[in-house]
Image (spheres, coloured by chain):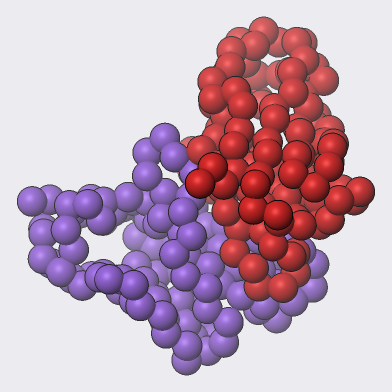
Amino acid sequence: EDQVTQSPEALRLQEGESSSLNCSYTVSGLRGLFWYRQDPGKGPEFLFTLYSAGEEKEKERLKATLTKKESFLHITAPKPEDSATYLCAVQAETGNQFYFGTGTSLTVIP
Amino acid sequence: NAGVTQTPKFQVLKTGQSMTLQCAQDMNHNSMYWYRQDPGMGLRLIYYSASEGTTDKGEVPNGYNVSRLNKREFSLRLESAAPSQTSVYFCASSHLSGLNQPQHFGDGTRLSIL
């Protein structure tokens, strides 16, 4: 069964304190792994797509990496405006469905 | 840039009532999706439409029906609402299903069933 697990569930950081969020997955052939940001009361907002192990993508203070079993979202010197829930999703080679993790709620304290 | 628009934003229903959630996208996307999001459960796929004229069941389709009205619009209907359907419903679209295309989401419909 295809599954996505995110950890930790919640993370509190001081402004400037770098950390990483984890997304581990089991899927029968990975077509793509997606990271989203979700603010309260809003829909998920697309951040990155990763397709193959070893791939990295960067956007401002965020960097996403991918291995054969997991992905990391590294947050460097976070600011309060980075506070949000970060969701990971995978799409398998077979089928059209996306499988989402339950997310990591990030709070960055000034 | 509207993107994906969902209506209504909030709704309260009584058990047994019916209603239709509307979704429209202006990005000329082929594929559209309906999800529900519940605390601790993550986003779960209800139905999707890979292209105009086709619909398929997702992970949790029971109690729901969908209609792909045209390329832009994809509606979700609850025929006889139950308290277990209290949730936040998100519509999403992507350029082509099955081809690594990210999904773009609306801001959701918050539905409470009493």
Q: Colour of chain A?
A: purple
Please state the total of marks drawn on the protein image.
Answer: 0
Residue at 60% x, 58% y is B103
Residue B70 as seen in the image, left or right of residue A103: right
Q: Position of residue B1 (x, y in %)?
A: 51, 46
In-image side of B66 versus A60 (left or right): right
Q: Residue visible at 35% across and 60% down?
A: A8
Percent x, y of residue A50: 52, 78
- Residue A27, visible in the rendered structure: no
Residue at far left of view: A110
Q: Nearer the viewer, residue A34 or B37?
A: A34
Farthest top residue in view:
B14
What tint does the image give chain B?
Answer: red
Q: Is residue B18 left or right of residue A42?
A: right
Is residue A102 visible in the rendered image? The answer is: yes
As drawn, A23 above or below B3: below
Residue A65: x and y in percent read 41, 81
Q: Residue furthest front?
A: B1
* Drawn side of residue A102 relative to residue A13, left or right: right
- Compared to residue A80, the image places residue A34 above or below, namely below
As displayed, is residue B83 above or below residue B67? Answer: above
State which quarter of the image contains the C terminus of chain B.
top right
Residue B70 location (% of width, % of height): 83, 42
In the image as oriented, which residue stretches furthest toward the bottom?
A: A54
Q: Residue drawn at (44%, 64%), measured in percent from left and top? A: A47
Q: Residue at x 76, y 33 (%)?
A: B75
Q: Nearer the viewer, residue A52 or B100?
A: B100
Residue B23, quarter of picture: top right
